[in-house]
Image (cartoon, rainbow, N blue to C red):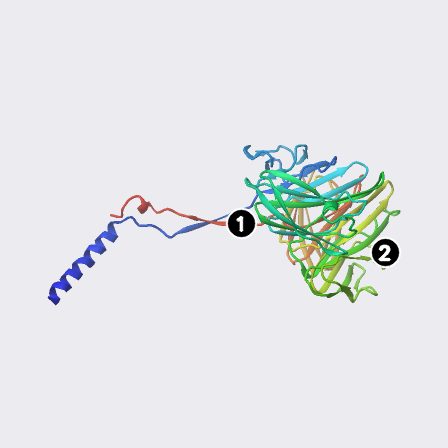
């Protein structure tokens, strides 16, 4: 009996082996693909003129509002936007967005995809406010965004906002916290693919005050650095700075502010122990601080995570405008098309080790190696088009410039990062049994 059972077990085992051999075999081999996600650039806000400085003429784009239209090459390096926001095909280079109201203000941003949380430190909701939050949904389904406003009075109730597919939605800031002087916004994407931008524009009666985009921060930190803060634009200009800061937690915090200048690094008197109430926005006037004679940076250190930015008012000749300079984030290699803009680039870090290459409007290539400690400023030459910055030391960077329409600031950051996806590789044995 035992021998019979053993024989049957052996026979079953042999049959199973043969069946397993004859069945189709699958492979566990996979392939990882890397690609850059598409980014968005806002269309004209109000009656402003909007321009996108694209990395190259071969960069493919389409209007966000036309999802059924294929992306097409633009044939221009500088593209005027007349029909709303655009979607830019994923690529490693940045697209710079410019918006201008002739003779009133100019503003710059990096066209991006921030589909998580964005903190905007800047703007006002008082009687001068024309500030607007722009939400761009480049996805094919409804998106939900939670907007929380903070001011000198603390936080307001979070407002859920629905953004229709392939569309822009504009929200006036004075509708979120009417009458507030100092604003910080937290914008969280609950679902969908949304990019948010904040334009701070102000008028006093019939008089222009100015306008600028507020660059977002992705998360609060106990240490923030804000580079590229100008002392002057020309010999007769008047420049006035103030620091906006808020602790994002629910406990008190203490912060200090350090000035980083080519002429020295120091903590001004009265700025070494700043008391911060939880989630209350505070402005610190820097007009009485000796900031030196050259473009400088600020380093904010706090006992609790904070968000911060600098508000700069400028009067120079016929220009009367302001700009917001947000805390910078680290980057590795960044490329963008300046299309003739001539900003001052400012690099801040314990060590500054940066290599820059560019091509001008004549097609000539040039390069520059920047070395130093704490802070190094460099004026971009005339006629620069595509520029690439390779950051070898972890320095933070920003750019600021003045035109006949106004002043603006641009954080030097990577607009997108490589995204990975896993793709299985099919084995021929899936459709043909092994012999």
Secondary element type, mark 1:
strand
Q: Where, by quadrant of the figure, is residue 101 drawn?
A: top right
Left or right, 368 with respect to 291, comes to left
Does residue 402 lie above or below 78 as drawn?
below
Quarter of the picture holding the N terminus: bottom left
User: Residue shown at 37%/46% (left/top)?
Assistant: 426
Left or right, 58 with respect to 305, comes to left
**Residue 384 in view of the camera:** no
In the image, residue 321 lies at what x, y percent?
Answer: 81, 44
In the image, residue 402 lies at what x, y percent?
Answer: 79, 44
Q: Looking at the picture, tell me which residue is in the foreground, 307 or 62.
A: 307
In the image, residue 235 lies at what x, y percent?
Answer: 87, 48
In the image, residue 350 lies at what x, y percent?
Answer: 70, 62
Farthest-out residue, right: 236
The CA distance from mark 2 to mark 1 is 44 Å
Q: Are marks 2 and 1 in contact (CB under 8 Å)?
A: no
Does label 2 or label 1 sit earlier along the sequence? Answer: 2
According to the picture, the residue beneath numbered tag 1 turns out to be 419
Q: Looking at the picture, tell me which residue is in the foreground, 12 or 228.
A: 12
According to the picture, the residue beneath numbered tag 2 turns out to be 287
User: Residue shown at 14%/62% (left/top)?
Assistant: 7
How many other residues sit within 10 Å of disc 2, few (<14), some (14-19) or many (≥20)? Answer: few
Q: Looking at the picture, tell me which residue is in the foreground, 380 or 208.
A: 208
Q: Where, by quadrant of the figure, is residue 45 drawn?
A: top right
Does residue 52 lie above or below 7 as drawn?
above
Mark carried by residue 7: none
């Amino acid at each position: 009996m035992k021998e019979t059972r053993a024989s049957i077990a052996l026979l079953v085992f042999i049959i199973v082996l043969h069946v397993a051999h004859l069945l189709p075999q699958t492979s566990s081999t996979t392939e990882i693909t890397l690609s850059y996600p598409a980014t968005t650039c806002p269309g004209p806000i109000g009656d402003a003129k909007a321009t996108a400085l694209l990395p190259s003429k071969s960069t493919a784009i389409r209007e966000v509002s036309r999802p059924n239209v294929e992306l097409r090459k633009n044939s221009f390096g500088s593209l005027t936007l007349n029909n709303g926001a655009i979607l830019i095909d994923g690529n490693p280079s940045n697209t710079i967005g410019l918006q201008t109201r002739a003779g009133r203000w100019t503003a710059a941003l990096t066209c991006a995809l921030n589909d998580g949380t964005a903190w905007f430190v800047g703007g006002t909701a008082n009687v001068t406010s024309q500030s607007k939050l722009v939400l761009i949904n480049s996805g094919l389904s409804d998106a939900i965004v939670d907007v929380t406003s903070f001011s000198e009075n603390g936080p307001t109730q979070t407002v859920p906002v629905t953004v229709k597919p392939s569309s822009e939605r504009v929200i006036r800031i004075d509708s979120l916290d009417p009458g507030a002087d100092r604003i910080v916004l937290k914008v969280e994407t609950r679902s969908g693919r949304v990019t948010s931008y904040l334009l701070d524009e102000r008028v006093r009666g019939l008089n222009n005050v100015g306008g600028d985009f507020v660059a977002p921060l992705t998360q609060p930190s106990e240490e923030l650095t804000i580079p590229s803060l100008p002392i002057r634009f020309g010999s007769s200009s008047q420049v006035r700075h103030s620091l906006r800061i808020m602790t994002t937690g629910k406990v008190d915090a203490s912060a200090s502010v350090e000035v980083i200048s080519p002429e020295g690094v120091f903590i001004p008197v009265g700025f070494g122990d700043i008391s911060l109430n939880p989630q209350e926005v505070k402005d610190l006037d820097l007009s009485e601080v000796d900031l030196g004679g050259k473009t400088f940076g600020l380093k904010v250190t706090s006992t609790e995570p904070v968000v911060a930015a600098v508000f700069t008012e400028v009067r120079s000749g016929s220009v009367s405008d302001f700009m917001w300079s947000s805390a910078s984030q680290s980057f590795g290699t960044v490329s963008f098309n300046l299309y003739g803009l001539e900003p001052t680039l400012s690099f801040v870090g314990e060590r500054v080790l940066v290599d820059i290459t560019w091509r001008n409007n004549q097609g000539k290539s040039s390069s520059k190696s920047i070395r130093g400690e704490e802070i190094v400023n460099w004026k971009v030459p005339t006629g620069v088009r595509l520029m690439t910055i390779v950051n070898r030391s972890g320095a933070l960077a920003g750019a600021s410039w003045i035109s006949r329409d106004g002043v603006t600031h641009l954080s030097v950051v990577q607009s997108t990062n490589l995204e990975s996806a896993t793709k299985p590789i099919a084995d021929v044995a899936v459709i043909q049994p092994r012999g």
